Amino acid sequence: MKLNQKIAIVTGGGSGIGRSAAIRFAREGAKVSVADVDSVSGEETVSLIREYGGDAIFVKSDVKDSNQVKELINTTTKTFGGLHILVNNAGISNSEVRSVDLSEEEWDHVIDINLKGVFLGIKYAVPEMKKSGSGSIINTSSLLGLKGKKYQSAYNASKAGVVLLTQNAALEYGKYNIRVNAIAPGVIDTKIIDVWKQDERRWPFISKANALGRIGTPDEVANAIFFLASDEASFITGTTLSVDGGGLTF
Ligand SMILES: NC(=O)c1ccc[n+]([C@@H]2O[C@H](COP(=O)([O-])OP(=O)(O)OC[C@H]3O[C@@H](n4cnc5c(N)ncnc54)[C@H](O)[C@@H]3O)[C@@H](O)[C@H]2O)c1
C-alpha cells in the first residue's frame, strides 16, 4: 500500500473522478476526508470505502466558501492528525451558450467553484502540510483548460487558470517539500458529461474525439491522481498531466 499513514482530502468526492480517487486512496492505505456539497453522494462514497475496511469521513463543504474550506481542513486534521494530500477536484461546467449570452452570475459561479475553490484549498491546506513535513496537491484542470472550445468561456477560463495556479503554488511551496500538480482529463464517463451524451447529433463525434477513439473512465483518471499523490512522483511538481486518450493532440 503506497499511501500508508497518509491523510488525504478529496473535494467533489461524492461522484465521478473524485469518488474513484477517494476509493483508490483508501485502498492504498490513506485516511480520506470526502468533501462534497452533496451529502447523500458523499456519504455513499464513505460507505463504499468502509465496506472493505478503509478509513474515511464525509465533511459537507462548498469549495467556494472560505469558512467551509477552513472547517474541512480543521475537521480533517483534528480527526486524522495531519494532512498530506489534497485533491482540489470539485467542479462544474457552464451552460453551453456563447459568451455574450452567459450571465455574469453564471460566470462568477463557475469561476468561484472551479478556480477560487482551488485557490482556497491551497491557501488553507499548505500551512497544515508544512506542519506534516510534506504534501502533494493535485488540482483537476481539464483538456478544456489547455484548449479552447466554443460555448465554454467560463469553464475554459477557470480550468486554464488552474494550470497556472498550479505552477504558482509549485514554485511557492516546493521548498517545504510540497508538490503541486494538475491533471487535465479529456471526456470521462461521469455525470458532468450527461448533457453531451444526450445530444444525439454531437455525441458520436465527442465520444471519439481523441487518439484512442473512446471516452475514459473515472478509474483511469484516479490512477493518474494516485500516481501524483504518491512518492513515485517525488520529482514531479508544477506539471499538468493530460489524461485524455490523446485528446489534446486530436
Ligand atoms: N468528466 C469529464 O469529462 C471531465 C473532463 C475534464 C475535467 N473534469 C473535471 O473533473 C472534476 C470532477 O468532475 P466529474 O467529471 O467527476 O463530475 P461529477 O459531476 O460526477 O462530480 C463533481 C462533484 O463535485 C461536486 N461539487 C460541485 N460543486 C461543488 C462545490 N461547490 N463544492 C464541493 N463539491 C462540489 C458535485 O456534487 C459532484 O459530486 C471537475 O473539476 C470537472 O470539471 C471532468
Image (spheres, grey):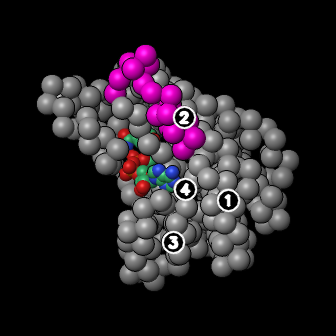
- For the residue pair 56 and 244, the one nearer the viewer reads as 56
Please state the extent of the stretch shown in magenta in the rendering: 96-114
* Mark 1 and mark 3: Cα distance apart in space: 17 Å
Image height of 200 relative to 27, above or below: above
* Mark 4 and mark 1: Cα distance apart in space: 9 Å
- For the residue pair 234 and 35, the one nearer the viewer reads as 35
Helix, strand, or loop for circle 1?
helix
Q: Disc 4 marks which amino acid?
A: Asp
- The spot of residue 131 in percent (x, y) is 83, 65
Q: Which residue is mark 3?
A: 58
Q: Name which of mark 1 and mark 2 comes first in the sequence.
A: 1
Q: Which residue is mark 2?
A: 108
Helix, strand, or loop for circle 3?
strand
Q: Disc 1 marks which amino acid?
A: Asn
Q: Disc 2 marks which amino acid?
A: Asp
Query: In the rendering, which numbered label is found on residue 155?
Result: none
Residue 141 visible? The answer is no
Image height of 182 relative to 37, above or below: above
Q: Which residue is mark 4?
A: 62
Determine the residue positioned at 44% across, 19% down: 99
